[in-house]
Amino acid sequence: MGKSPFDLENQNENIDSRIVAAMERVSQAFRVLLWNQSKETSLSPIQIQILIFLMFHSEEKRKVSYLAEEFNMTKATISDSIKVLAQKRMISKKSEMHDTRSYVIYLTSKGLEVAKKIATFAGRMQTPINRLDLADKENLLMSLMDIIHYLNKTGVITIQRMCKTCVYFSPGSDTTHHFCRLLNQKLFDKDLRIDCPEHVLGTN
Ligand code: SF4
């Protein structure tokens, strides 16, 4: 069995373990901020995440099966949350022509109003990032993308819509820029997307 990154002796001797422990603290901060929002709105954390997701994503992604994959949850759990949001009159459903068991989810005007308010729940995470200089931001973004890419490839997290996994992405070498063949434009490190509406999963 490998050493735990939460074993303080190991952590203090090993920068990799300290980075894992630091990431755990950041994920804890997200949980706290989400819970604070949850208390204010009487919505569960997953209901909050669903409302925010619905506000920013297109129809083909606003379905129970997609949401289940997006949030790494079962369809039953997502369906329960959708039911509660419908009871609260924050969403409505429209059956699909080709399959009446499947439906697209829409925010109602009440749902949109709530989603706009809660979408800034992670605002305090942004303040320390705003203070970094551009080179540090680029390094941080590239490192996080590499970590997310690995976690996606090894099945820890499911759907990703970032450039590195996109069929249209041509990675540049160290000295050149990357390129998006769909948008037909250069992409520098700072331009790489983490959630692109045009993303099509490739074999990267
Ligand atoms: S389509 Fe979007 S995700 Fe794909 S390479 Fe272009 S910008 Fe990146």
Image (cartoon, rainbow, N blue to C red):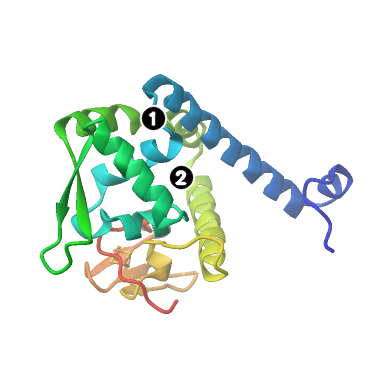
The residue where tag 2 is placed is 134
Left or right side of 145 for 24: right
In the image, what residue occupies the spot 64% across and 38% down? 25
Query: What secondary structure is found at the residue carrying circle 1?
Result: loop
Nearer to the camera, 166 or 156: 156
Whether residue 87 is visible, yes or no, is yes
Which residue is more in the foreground, 148 or 185?
A: 148
Contact, mark 2 vs mark 1 (Cβ under 8 Å): no
Q: Is residue 93 shown above or below 26?
A: below
Q: Amino acid at mark 2?
A: Leu
Instruction: Say if 16 sits above or below 46 in the image.
Output: below
Residue lying at 22% horizontally and 61% vertically, measured from the top left: 101
Residue in the picture at 53% in, 54% down: 144
Nearest-to-viewer mark from 2 and 1? 1
Whichever of labels 2 and 1 marks the residue nearer the N terminus, that label is: 1
Q: Quick one: label 1, few (<14), some, or many (20+) residues within 10 Å?
A: some
Residue depicted at 26% across the width and 33% down the height: 87
Disc 2 versus disc 1: distance between alpha carbons? 36 Å
**Mark 2 residue crowding within 10 angstroms, few (<14) / some (14–19) / many (20+):** few
Q: Quadrant of the C terminus?
A: bottom left
- Residue 194 visible (yes or no): no
Residue 80: x and y, percent?
A: 37, 44
Viewer-closest of 126 and 133? 126
Determine the quadrant in which ligand 1 lies.
bottom left
Query: Mark on residue 43?
Result: 1
Q: Which mark is residue 105?
A: none
